[in-house]
Amino acid sequence: MLTKPDEPASRTSALPKSLSLGVLAVVFIAELLLMFLLPRLLPTADEVVVGIADSIVLTLVVSPFLCFFIYREASKRKSADEAMAERSRELARSNADLEQFAYAVSHDLREPLRMIRVFLELLGKRYEGKLDADADDFIAFAADGAARMQKQIADLLDYSRVGSSGIELSPLESGVALERALGDLRLALEESGAVVTHDLLPRVLADESQLVRLFQNLIGNAIKFRGNEPLTVHVGAAEREGVWVFSVRDNGIGIASEHFEKIFLLFKRIYSPSEYPGTGIGLAICKKIVEQHGGRIWVESEPGQGATFYFTLPVMGDSSS
Amino acid sequence: MNHPASCGPVEIFLVEDNPGDVRLTREALKEGKIYHNLWVAKDGEEALAMLHRKGEYSDIPVPDIILLDLNLPRVDGRDVLARIKEEEELKMIPVVVLTSSEAEQDVLKAYNLHANCFVTKPVDLEQFMMVVRAIESFWLTIVKMPTRI
């Protein structure tokens, strides 16, 4: 007797709209029927009786439809909510699986790899110069490969561990986290003669050890990729559109724009390990840390002009310190 | 424990399921200067049988030091450690946990079970050799142990 437009999935705004349309249509049709039927069924009754009968019948006719629509809409909405919850559970589970996988792979691969490396080294140590020049080269290449793979696996393990036991957000002074990072980098800072300055830094909601690590990796990179001039690093923070935008600016060798995205990926490097040591884990860890805090990270730079890394952290209630 | 010059070889007991590590330890000990016998158990069950000198092991000497891996087939290294430290005749033997694990809970558990020390197997040859020699020199020449009856 009446049809309701079929909607793909119920949205909150669709509920009242379709419900009121349905009810209106039912009321309208029922009213039409009653207007024709009642006077014929009860020819002797007066208008008041017809009016009362009209409303009783109307209520009886409308109520089931009303209940039916409400039930249908509610169940649709419920199933949409359930689907959403299910999807997010699935996502969390697949993330956890992935973490678990990375951990297992990196952990369980270490043992056989240790054997490969150690015995290649023993082979090199015992037989260097006793076979021929080719054999010496081959052993050296194999041992070098094993050593590098070992470093990468250790880094992968490290990466998979970032926040794997859950991050603990608490209000803290980002300036204190920076000082702690600088303390850990003291030797490298002294050796490079770097000068690090900073703005007044805000109080933020963050995981302390992760924030320390974030500063440490970013400033560590500034030290590693410094240019010929004495290194200066400036850490700033500004509130913009409801988030704190931190910046770590250096006067190092800079980065070409085509690498802006790539540098944050796991094991992606611009330079060969012989030019700049490392496996390419540092910025991937930074990205993971920032994203676990619900922020984002990016870089602005030009080759030879230094680089500025930005990351965002949510603003706390009363945050300026 | 008394020392090599007067009492013959030092008895070193290695509990290790990985033949590669057994060989490495053997090589490292060979490079060291200490006159020793190396006894190897390749799982926890065999380790306990040897320590209790059961059956075919009735002739083997009581070890001067035990190098113990944690992850072992059959009887786990942690259980072997617990048994050693529970038994009157064995509990004074220094046990060096030598494992590839660096997990905090493994370290804690080992010391809770009265391991004498916990060492993570180094990932490169030089370090591995160095560690075995360091264990050897510390436990077998530097420390003073009670004289065995």
Image (spheres, rainbow, N blue to C red):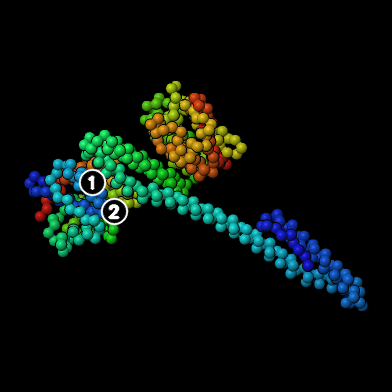
**Disc 1 residue type (three-letter):** Leu
Amino acid at pointer 2: Leu
Closer to us: mark 1 or mark 2? 1
Q: Residues within 10 Å of mark 1 (few under 14, many from 20)?
A: some
- The residue identified by callout 2 is B70
| Residue tagged 1 | B24
Residue A101 image label: none
A236 to A109, vertically: above or below: above
Left or right: B5 as drawn, with respect to B116: left
Chain bearing tag 2 is B
Element on which disc 2 rests: loop
Q: Would residue B113 be seen by someone viewing this image from the given angle?
A: no
Residue A196 in the image, given as x and y percentages of width and height: 45, 28
Asked whether the residues under marks 1 and 2 belong to the same chain, the reply is yes
Mark nearer the N terminus (1 vs 2):
1
- Give the image location of residue A52, x and y in percent: 85, 72
Image quadrant where one finds the C terminus of chain B:
bottom left
Q: Is residue A97 left or right of residue B142?
A: right
